[in-house]
Image (tube, helix red, strand yellow):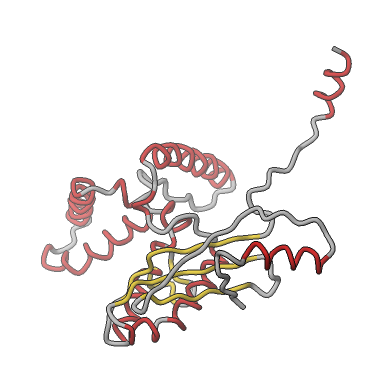
Amino acid sequence: MLTAFNASTFGGTFQAAVIKIGEKIELRRFNTLTADATTALNGYIHSNTRIAVILTAKCDSEKTAEGMRATLKQIAMHTSAMKPTTLSYKDFDAAYVASETVGRIEVIKKENEELARLKKPLKNVPTYISMSQLTEEVLAKAESDIKATLKEQGKPEKIWDKIVPGSLARFISDNTTLDKEQALLDQNYVLDEKKTVAQAVDAAAKALGGTAEITAFIRLEVGEGIEKAEDDFAAEVAAQMA
């Protein structure tokens, strides 16, 4: 159940809850989302009460906003399970993407060394990891490379138009792993993995005769972000001997 608090009375409500529980409780995180008549808002609290999600979607009309609430509940459940950290790949910092690219490629290379030792199929090593890196030039080269491969394979040019789109889609999928892991709108929707979350929202809005776009989400999990101290026994002994 999602409860709305008036900003001027939240402090009193929280303090009353602390007194009732009888334990010292400090408010560590607090987020809000607001909605008007054409903005759909809904959320989800997982059955373990440790994960809560709330989302908003801007719609073309009040009718669409009302109709989209059920879909937002499903998207909130998806968000609970899939743990996105941002709304879109467009939110990623370029330096972060560059660092992740190097790290992820090295991980796959090491995994492939073990797979090769076991004589198992190797994983594809991507060149990129985010749509933010797939410029028009990159996509044009990928399409050119696909056509060159088809030519080497002796595939008739008249059927290329039936093969190229699927191959290009696979290239994009293989080279956007960061987006699919961390960006909500770019993740494969758990209730229909043939669609991204953005595509699922668009389809739901069209079925209502309107448009909708998720504009914000908040996902909170109990204990998230708390650093746990790790004891280093050797360092502790060395410090005592110094």
Q: Is 52 left, or right, of 128 in this rendering? A: right
Q: Position of residue 188 (x, y in %)?
A: 43, 67
Compared with 65, 5 (above or below) is above
Q: Position of residue 122 (x, y in %)?
A: 48, 49
Q: Position of residue 184 (x, y in %)?
A: 44, 62
Seen from the viewer's position, the closer of residues 222 and 236 is 222
User: Quarter holding the N terminus?
Assistant: bottom right
Seen from the viewer's position, the closer of residues 130 and 115 is 130
Q: Position of residue 4 (x, y in %)?
A: 56, 73
Residue found at x 31% / y 86% = 207
**How many numbered marks does the figure carry?**
0
Compared with 202, 98 (above or below) is above
Q: Is 154 left, or right, of 42 in this rendering? A: left
Q: Is 50 left, or right, of 59 in this rendering? A: right
Residue found at x 47% / y 69% = 55
Seen from the viewer's position, the closer of residues 150 and 163 is 163
In the picture as drawn, the residue positioned furthest to the left comes out as 158
Q: Quadrant of residue 82?
A: bottom right
Q: Is 211 left, or right, of 28 in this rendering? A: left
In the picture as drawn, the residue positioned furthest to the top comes out as 242
Q: Quadrant of residue 96?
A: top left
Q: Quadrant of residue 167?
A: bottom left
Compared with 107, 171 (above or below) is below
Residue found at x 74% / y 67% = 16
User: Quarter holding the C terminus?
Assistant: top right
